[in-house]
Image (cartoon, helix red, strand yellow):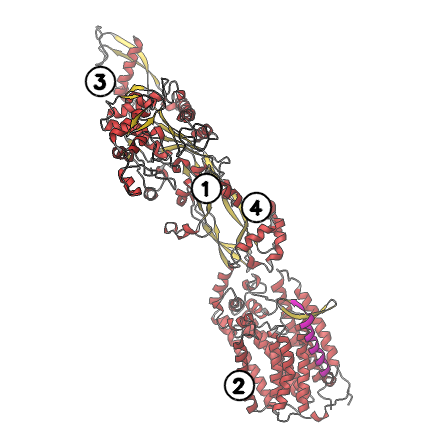
Amino acid sequence: MVSEHSSNRGEKIPGVKLAVVQYGILLMMLALGAGLWRLQVLGAENFRQLAEANRIRKEPIMAPRGKLFDRENRLIVDNYPSVTCFLVREQSHNVDADLPLIAQGLSLDLDQLRATLKHYRSSPGYQPIPIKQDITADEQAFIAAHRNELPELETIDVERRLYPRDGFASHLIGYVGEVSEEDLNNPRFAFYQPGDVVGKAGVEETYDALLRGEDGSRDVIVDSHGREVGYLRTQHAVPGKDLRLTIDNDIQRAAELALGDASGAVIVMDPRNGDILAMVSHPSYDPNAFAVKINRADWNKLVTDPRHPLMNKAIQDQLAPGSTFKIIMSAAGLQEGVAQNMHVMCNGGATFYGRFFKCDHHHGLLDIQEAIPMSCDTFFYALAQKLGIDTIAKYAIEFGLSQKTGIDLPNEMTGIMPSTEWELKNFHQKYYAGNTISVGIGQGETQVTPIQLLRALSGIASDGHFVRPRVVDPSQLPSNFRQALLDSFPGSGTKYVPLNTDTWMTITDGMAAATTPGLYHTAEAAHLDGVDFAGKTGTAQVVGGGDTHTKGGSKTPNAWFVGMVPRRNPEMAIVVLQEHGDWGSGSAMIAQRVVIAYVNKMRREEHNVLDQAGAAKPVEVGAVWSDPAPAGRGASGKRASVVRAGHFFVHPDPNIHPEAVATGTPQWPAWLTASLLRFKEDLH
Amino acid sequence: MRRFLSFRDFDWALLGMVLVLCIISILEIYSTTVHTRFASFESKQIIFIAAGLVGMFVLSKIDYHRLLDWSPWVYGFFLLSLVAVKLVGRRALGAKRWIAIGPVQFQPSEWVKLVLVLVVARYFANLGGRNLTWTDILKAFGLVGIPMALVLIQPDLGTTLTYAPILVAGLFLGGINFRQAAILLICGTALIAGVWTSGKILKPYQKARLTSFINPDNDPRGSGYQIRQSLIAVGDGGIWGKGQSKGSQTQGYFLPIPYTDFIFAAFSEEHGFVGAVFVLLLYFFILMRLIQNAQTAADLPGSLIIMGIVAVLTFQIAVNVGMVIGFMPVTGIPLPLMSYGGSSVLFTFLALGVAMNVRMRRFVN
């Protein structure tokens, strides 16, 4: 080969320059070596920790939410395991290109999926976007099989709420949903994290802090794609507390069946302690629809439905009480000493303040004993006139109207009780006395909720013992939570208003008469043989409705009934509201059906108790004794030598030692004396 | 003139060290890709190396003087192909760097490096080692600057930067005096400052990449992520390393592209300070051996060729390892002989082939 660069031959790069380059390279290598020394020898421990932190991710373990049971420990609300699919955009090279495959594999609508992603467009790429909840086993298999092609898909196991399917007690139970922005800003819910599932209504909302439990966490070793490659430490979740509700499934079911398709509410309560045995609001909704994300169309349908399915009418519907208010009128009138001696002539109405006020019938001359069962408007117009609005209001407010009852359910309404003070405050004007007449029969501006009415009337029937209604027995709650609950749900609560015995007797007898056959008795069709069933109907005209009686029409009166069993110190009280249900007697029939279910259940239970409780069975005891018998055995002319023998039943009492019988102490125990007396009667 | 060329004169020691590095590279590529969808990259790398070896032997057979004679034509051809890339190139990851000729994908910017080494050596050799005039210096800048500009607009900042050391080495060894060097340094600094502040020539992501190494924690999920993960990987290795295929940073995919640009971080995590220093020593000895070959070269062009190659290799090692240990910004420059990639492997072996070529003809007189 020929070189054409002969002029260069012999010329060389000066050695010193090459030496400079060599030393330069040596210096560079030393610098790099020093850098390695700094990181790998001096900083090794620090970086080891960083590497650990890198690969360990805290993963939440969802606490299963507490289950709900009825008062007899029958399961109402359960949980089921469910899997939610998330999309993490950061983990994919090209999410948009993957979408058709994802939509196909998860059977989603492609446009809707795109819309979902668009909605999250501005959030950071590492934020998981929920794209489908409650995915099927097939869809899970699809995600698992496409781990490499679709690394952006993630799944998470959650426990989901399973509610009764037909909307059973749905308003009382409520539902759960993702925590809202407002709740997150509320200091009361400081423990909520974004994305948490929380109670949104009913018991689920009130008792959320107990039901939710405490989420645990697990330290998961992951790679940079978030794929799990192992586990380290696990902090187990504390499951939510199971709660026993006060409702009785049987009574609840009976109440729902009795109300049927009517729009309205039924509440059954034990007025001795406030336990709500049943609470129905109709129409209802399926809470399961909320447990998985509800779609917009269904939500709009629920919100715009004129029959207000989302409203818990039992505690939120504020309506004129109609004639049921006459019980409060009666109590006020009797307590004031006005009503006892009133005799009013009803000629189908009467004129007050220059205006004629109508009554349904020509009841003739009547007193309060007849006015209650006949629900004579004329009598109560007259009573209202005599009492005046402020006396009526005083008693009504005393009995809990225009205040919340304090029931442990969210968003209870207060209702309205008009008075001069109220008129002044709200309309800045003097109260027009003529309005008092309408208030006397529960019309006018008065508005009550079913729960208020039930508490008020059953409280009067319980001799002035008013109770705070409740849907969860507080004995199962931690004491600090119990107090917080009382503070969070202020209301008229449990209260004693002393009533004259006359007042109590007159009103309860009057209500009992209403359900007894008799001329003009408003609820005679609801009569039950052998059951001490008392009550009061109400047919409350709606604003602008006048006297229209076409059932179900928007101007048809609302039909009320408040009833109790037995008439005094009732153990069960019921309120029925049928919106636009026309006559209150119809609501009385609904109440009757629930009462039958209640009474039948109680009777059945009593029999069951006798059959089952072997230990409590009377024991047959033989005995021999001589006259004279112990004092109180009655006259017997025979001498002491007469010996008697017999056998009788005694109920074993754990508080008394059996020796007491065997030793034959002169001091006979009271229970034995009673048994012997019964025995003596048997002998005769 | 003719002399029988024997492979006895081939630099077997150099080749031995290179092959040791190649084996380390293959093992590390295997380790970083075995559980990923890039598995079997190490076999591809073996094929590249084999092709590189063949290329190296073929190139060493062609007298480097002939290569120098051809170099202007080749230089012209590559300038045209760089223009072609801009016009008809295939877009990948936001840049046009490739042209497809049938099934073969061709990235001219890698080859330009070797061509530049040759044309720069030829240029300065023709100047004969005399003191450089400003015209000479400007011509040299033009020679290297035109392809630099063409590659910069692809955009491919990393490759662009690798051309610079060829020019620097040429100027330094070709006879620039101290005063000229100082003036150039000042001008260069001013130019860089101007480019930086103009905001047009460098894209924002390039700027972010260039600065994030100073404080990677500023944006641990963004541009600082790579450098941060790299530092953690290197530091996590400690003195003895975590062991082959046992680095959590590497195996957990926290380390970005651990088989190419960050292969040294992966290797450092799994083989520790001891392994990393061993690799650095290998590079050091390879470079020293090349410089020795430059010293013993038969003529100035031969020396300049080898020193051009030394400049490119040194620059790439410094920038890549510097990047991995947080001394340098992330520029996407592969580590010669270690990083996975056909173009990089081929360039290195062909460059070494030219260096061998010079060595084998050191006794030609």
Q: Nearer the viewer, residue A339 or A588?
A: A339
Disc 1 and disc 2: Cα gap in Å? 73 Å
Mark 4 to mark 3 CA distance (whole Å): 79 Å
The answer to which image quadrant residue A431 occupies is: top left
Evaluate whether label 3 is on the same chain as label 2.
no
Chief secondary structure of the magenta span? helix
Left or right of A6 on screen, residue A317? left
Nearer to us of marks 1 and 4 is 1
Residue A135: which numbered mark, if any? 4
Q: Quadrant of the C terminus of chain A?
A: top left
Q: Amino acid at mark 3?
A: Pro
Residue under circle 3? A666
State the SS at label 2.
helix
- Report helix, strand or loop for mark 4: loop
Q: Which mark is residue A175?
A: 1
Q: Say which amino acid is labelled 1.
A: Tyr
Q: Residues within 10 Å of mark 3 (few under 14, many from 20)?
A: few
In three-dimensional space, the C-alpha distance between marks 3 and 1, rounded to whole angstroms, equals 66 Å
Residue type marked 4:
Ile
- From this viewpoint, is residue A564 visible? no
Mark 4–mark 3 CB contact (< 8 Å): no
Give the label on residue B303, or none: none
Q: Chain of mark 1?
A: A
Q: Quadrant of residue B8?
A: bottom right
> Which image quadrant for residue B140?
bottom right
CB-based contact (under 8 Å), mark 3 and mark 1: no
